[in-house]
Amino acid sequence: MIFMDRQDAGRQLGARLEHLRHRDAVVLGLPRGGVPVAFEVAQAIGAPLDVCLVRKLGVPFQPELGMGAIGEDGVRVINDAVVREARVPPEDLARVEEHERIVLEQRARRYRGECEPVTLQGRTVVVVDDGVATGSTARAACRIARARGAERIVLAVPVAPSDWTERLGGEADELVSVATPRDFFAIGQFYADFAQTDDEEVADCLRQAAGRSAGGSTETGSSETELEVTAGAVRLRGQLTAPEDAPGVVLFAHGSGSSRHSPRNQFVATGLNRAGLGTLLFDLLTEEEEQDRANVFDTGLLARRLADATSWLRAQPGFETLAIGYFGASTGAAAALWAAAEPEARIAAVVSRGGRPDLAGPRLPAVSAPTLLIVGGADPTVLDLNRQAQARLRCENHLAIVPGATHLFEEPGTLEVVTDLARDWFTDHMAPAHV
């Protein structure tokens, strides 16, 4: 294993692509798994993010054999040799292409909504996937990007077979990979977490990237600032969104291996912003600290970082009297409750999403902030742990179960339920803090 998850892979890959900053680059992620990786790359080099929508044209009687590919803007790449050898008549090719064109347009609407694709004409285009196996999709994506007017193409992946440059070197002007192991069997073997990426995560990555590239403000009229949070002796990267006249700010404690760019936390934060609440999403660990897996599960360390970030925020002009809330996801929920249990914490409310409050251990009875525990109905182990933890809480508390939701709330509509529950809990309990 080399990468914790796609976000970790994207950050490592982004570090290899720093030379593309200020090169008028566009980052294209291959749906679906390549998009979270591409999101991190786009942030690292300060480039816009889009998807590279490619549909393979499979031979009618052998769909796994590609006879070409299509992309947006009417682009098509046909492998004439395969068409000849498979004896595919023009009308069958046209029928396959028509079907795949419909699917491609549906995917474009699902991911982008009404937004137009980013222009590639005359630009450096970075094609990103979560890894290369056979290379057929990456090859088609590079050809599509070239046909759409890309001046220079960089194919970038976290992991690829050792011979990938020989197979794909002719498709791109530059090939970049973090690792090229010899014992390569499948992309997933190099990830600790290789869970499937869903359509909503792809769409959310695009929304978040579009919001940041638009600069300074969000759709709610809030001010949005990329900053560094001082937490003890370290400085941590963060994103502060502050709607006008917000009664308080919710600090997010993400789960193991995640970051301030977590699409799910970003989704919830946007919902809180719409309700007039401020949000601060920040990395609990430095990049160097993240390399030590033990730090990711050090609840005490993460809680101290959260408490230090709270003190830092309260010292900023205009935030002295605002209420502070905590939103913790997975193991981050334990850090949130641990920090909220400190005698001088003065936390207005805590919300846990799919959390592990049990990891806060003996600190639970000391939590005084009203606490909402949100758990998926199809996440039985975590649900049982939350019930046990709830029994130890002495503060106002409630356990909300989202029917049909698993641990990551990937099922359609479940993350919206989480957002509504969190919004209502915070707005009911947030009031200006006493100083």
Image (cartoon, rainbow, N blue to C red):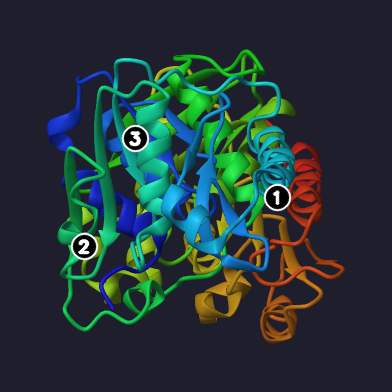
Q: CA distance from mark 1 to mark 3?
A: 43 Å
Mark 1 vs mark 3: which is more N-terminal?
3
Q: Which residue is mark 3?
A: 43
Is residue 403 among the parts visible in the rendering?
A: yes
Which is more foreground, mark 1 or mark 3? 1
Q: Quadrant of the N terminus?
A: bottom left
Residue at the image point whose x is 37% and y is 51% from the top: 138
| Residue labelled with disc 1 | 92
Distance, label 2 to label 3, CA atoms, is 26 Å
**Residue type at the position of mark 3:** Gln
Relative to 185, say whether 234 is above or below.
above
Residue lying at the far right in this picture: please name it.
Answer: 403
Q: Nearer the viewer, residue 318 or 401?
A: 401
User: Taking 275 as reference, is 305 above or below it?
Assistant: below
Asked if residue 233 can be seen in this view, the reply is no
Whole-angstrom CA distance, mark 1 to mark 2, is: 33 Å
| Mark sitting earlier along the chain (1/2) | 1
Quarter-of-image position of residue 287: bottom left
Kindly indicate the quadrant of the structure image that contains residue 192: bottom left
- Residue at image position (73%, 76%) is 390
Secondary structure at badge 2 equals helix
Q: What percent of the width, then of the height, locates residue 392?
A: 68, 80
Q: Which residue is mark 2?
A: 164
Q: Position of residue 73 (x, y in %)?
A: 56, 24
Of circles 2 and 3, the one toward us is: 2
The single residue placed furthest to the left in the displayed view is: 19
